[in-house]
Image: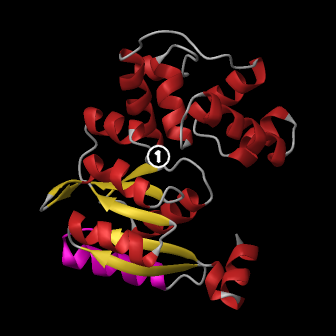
């Protein structure tokens, strides 16, 4: 991370570009100040509603969107697909005051990169941006357990030809492990893990790790550890 911060400091174009979508002015301003203080992050805009968000996604080309769930002109989760269609490479992290099971599932299936409670410390929100930008899952352990349990209840049918290694990596993703942690657990390189993850995303027709988990659990491809007790 120090390397990425140094690179961003010397090359502003390398900084992670963040769009904040939230209609609570004080919260949005506090978040903007916290993110702007980081050399490897830059806030490219703030939107108070979905209409502004759609326009800013096109004009500011963000890498990460911090998206409030409840906005004046609709639910943030319902707009994830549209926002990602405007910029397919963007990672969306949902900001929520309450982690409702149905919302977690809907956001996951729409391709969001993670969730974070609005009551979380600003430091965790900053970490959420970096985590999402790196292509990792940004979900607290308690929310991840709740999400996996809900997905397991929606089990439908088996399918997809995954290798044993791909299933193993999916199970480790379900534990909340990053690519680096998975590599250490399996004694393989991070690059090899990334290749397996990309293969998983392609086979499951998913755009993020969370969406891949959604498909895998819904179709009974893996049994998430501890999900039934969440």
Q: Is residue 136 above or below residue 217?
A: below
Give above or below for 52 relative to 206. below
Q: Out of 156 and 88, give the one closest to the viewer.
A: 88
Instruction: For residue 230, say whether it is visible.
Output: no
Query: Is 34 within the magenta?
Result: yes
Foreground of the two, 134 or 182: 134
Rendered view: 207 above or below 63 = above
Q: Residue at horizontal 42%, vertical 17%? A: 228
Number of numbered discs: 1
Q: Is residue 11 visible?
A: yes
Q: Is residue 155 above or below residue 38?
A: above
Using residue 93 as the reference point, say whether residue 179 is left or right of it: right
Q: At which x and y percent is residue 126?
A: 48, 69
Image quarter where the C terminus lies is top left
Question: Which quarter of the figure has residue 46?
Answer: bottom left
Residue at image position (48%, 49%) is 113
Residue visible at 63% across and 26% down? 171
Magenta stretch: residue 230 in it? no
Q: Which residue is mark 1?
A: 139
Q: How is the image coloured?
A: secondary structure
Secondary structure type for disc 1: loop
Residue situated in front as seen by the camera: 39 or 215? 215
The residue most toward the bottom is 10
Left-right relation of 85 to 164 = left
Tell me the residue at 67%/79% (across/down): 5
Q: Residue furthest top?
A: 157
The x and y percentages for residue 120 are: 36, 60
* Residues drawn in magenta: 21-36
- In the picture provided, is 169 more to the left or to the right than 89? right
Left or right, 8 with reference to 217? right
Which is the main secondary structure of the residues drawn in magenta? helix
């Amino acid at each position: 991370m120090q390397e990425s911060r140094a690179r961003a400091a010397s090359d502003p174009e390398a900084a992670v570009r963040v769009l904040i979508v939230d209609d609570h002015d004080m919260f949005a301003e506090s978040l903007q100040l916290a993110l702007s203080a980081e050399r490897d992050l830059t806030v490219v805009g703030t939107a108070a509603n979905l209409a502004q968000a759609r326009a800013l996604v096109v004009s500011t080309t963000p890498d990460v969107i911090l998206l409030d769930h409840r906005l004046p002109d609709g639910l943030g989760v319902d707009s994830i697909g549209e926002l990602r269609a405007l910029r397919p490479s963007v990672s969306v992290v949902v900001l929520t005051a309450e982690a409702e099971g149905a919302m977690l599932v809907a956001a996951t299936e729409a391709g969001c990169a993670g969730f974070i409670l609005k009551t979380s410390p600003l430091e965790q929100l900053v970490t959420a941006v970096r985590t999402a930008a790196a292509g990792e899952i940004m979900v607290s352990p308690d929310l991840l357990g709740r999400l996996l349990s809900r997905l397991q209840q929606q089990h439908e049918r088996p399918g997809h030809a995954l290798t044993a290694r791909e299933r193993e990596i999916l199970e480790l993703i379900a534990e909340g492990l990053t690519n680096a942690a998975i590599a250490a657990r399996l004694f393989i390189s991070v690059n090899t893990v990334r290749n397996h993850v990309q293969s998983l995303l392609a086979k499951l027709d998913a755009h993020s790790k969370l969406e891949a988990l959604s498909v895998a659990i819904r179709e009974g491809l893996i049994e998430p550890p501890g999900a039934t007790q969440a």
